[in-house]
Amino acid sequence: MIVRPVHSGDLSAVLALAQCAGPGFTTLPANEERLAHRIRWAQRTFASQVERADADYLFVLEDDDQQVLGVSALGGAVGLREPWYNYRVGLTVNRSASLGIEQQLPTLFLNNDMTGQSEVCSLFLHPAHRLGHNGRLLSLARLLFVAEYPQLFGDKLIAELRGSADAQGCSPFWDSLGRHFFRQDFRHADHLSGLGNKTLIAELIPRQPLYTCLLTEQARDVIGKAHENAEPARRILDAEGFVHQGYVDIFDAGPVIEAPVGTIRAVRDSQPLSLLIGSPDDQAPVWLIHNRRLENCRITVARAQRDGSNLLVDRSTARRLQLQPGNLVRAVALYAEQQQTAAAVLSGAAGLSQKHTPSSTSIALQ
C-alpha cells in the first residue's frame, strides 16, 4: 500500500468512495463535477501553483494493483478566503445577589478562531479494506507530509470530526438549532455545505451567544460528540496529540480537535534517514516512511530496522517509494509504543519489545 497525490485518472474511484461514505462527508461530496474540480486543484497544489490560502492536498491510498481504496487530505489554511465558523462551548454565569440565585449556563459562541490554521480532512477508507495498517497509514501519512514541508502549513492542525446523526442521516443538533434559521433539513444543508456554500448557510445563523438549555435534550447530548463511524479516526489523532478544546461544528456539533504542529508525535519524532535495502527482521518495528518528494510524494508502511542514520527496508518497500539505496527518507515508528523498540535497536539492546501492536484499524471519516 502507498499514499500518493491524487491524479485525474482517480476521478471514478474517488467518486465511488464519496458515494460509499454517505451523508455527513461535507469535504468530499458525491458530485462528479465538484470532485473533478477538486482533483484538478489538488494537482495544482502539489505542483506549488497555488497560495497557502487555497492549497488542497488530496491524497489517495493505492494497493499494489493500483486500485484506489481510500482518500485523505490537508487544507493549507482555513478562513483566509471566506469566514470559517465554529461554535466555542463556553459558560455564561448569571447571578442575583438579592434573590440568592446563581445560574451557570453552557453557551455556544460563534467564532472564527481557527482562521489561518491548516486542516486534516476528507478521510475515508473503503469498509472492505479497514484492516491491517491501512487506516493508520491513510491518516498519519498526512502528518508525515506536514513534517517534511512545515513551511506549507499553519502553526496548528485542526480536524472537524463528523457529528452524531441517526441512521437516516438526521442531526439532532441541526434539527434543534440550524433548521429554524435555514428552514431546510440537515441532509440539504449538508449537501450545500459540500458544494462550497457553508459560509452562505452560516450567514443565516444568529451571531448572538446561544444558551444550550434552549436546545432539546437530544441536541445537548451530542454537542462535542463524534459520530460512531468517526471514532476510530479520532482515536488515531488523539494518540498523536490532538485534543478537543471546546470547539464544535456549526451544523452537527461534531468536535473540532487540534494540535500545535510541533507537538504532533509523527511530526516531532520523525527524522531523515538514509535508505538501505536488505531483509529486516520479521519482528522489526513497523515504520511510516515518506520519500521526501512533493509532487511525486509516496508514503508507505513497512517493517524496517534503524541503524544509526540508516533505515533498512526490503526491496518491495523501496520499489513502492520509487527510491534507490542511499536516498533519503523521512520516517517515524507507525505506533507510538514502538518508538521504544526502535530506540532499543539503535542502541544495540538485545531483543525487541514484546508490546502488543494492534493488528487492525477500523477507520471511517472525518
Image (cartoon, rainbow, N blue to C red):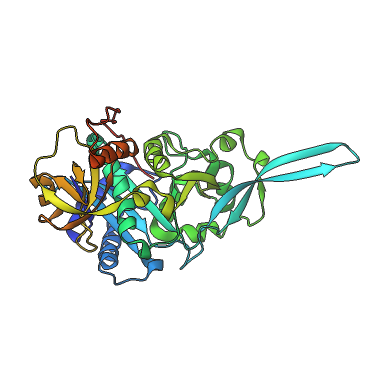
The quadrant in which the N terminus is found is: top left
At horizontal 45% and vertical 34% (from top left) the residue drawn is 166
Q: Is residue 366 above or below residue 262?
A: above
Q: Total marks drawn?
A: 0
Based on the displayed image, in which of its 4 quarters is residue 366 positioned? top left
Q: Locate residue 222, reporting x and y percent.
A: 53, 37
151 vs 163, nearest the viewer: 151
Residue 42 in the figure: left or right of residue 151: left
Q: Is residue 255 visible?
A: no
Please name the residue shown 33% across and 56% down the image.
Answer: 147
Residue 361, compared with residue 187, is above or below; it is above
Horizontal side, residue 245 vs residue 148: left or right: right
Q: Using the image as rendered, state which of residue 136 and residue 307 is in the foreground.
A: 307
Residue plotted at (59% across, 52% down)? 181
Q: Nearer the viewer, residue 102 or 253?
A: 102
Residue 229 percent coordinates (x, y): 38, 36
* Residue 83 visible from this viewpoint: yes
Pick the residue in front: 173 or 83: 83
Residue drawn at (22%, 64%) of the image: 295
Image location (x, y in percent) of residue 50: 33, 71
Which x, y percent locates residue 130? 26, 36
- Farthest residue to the right: give it: 98
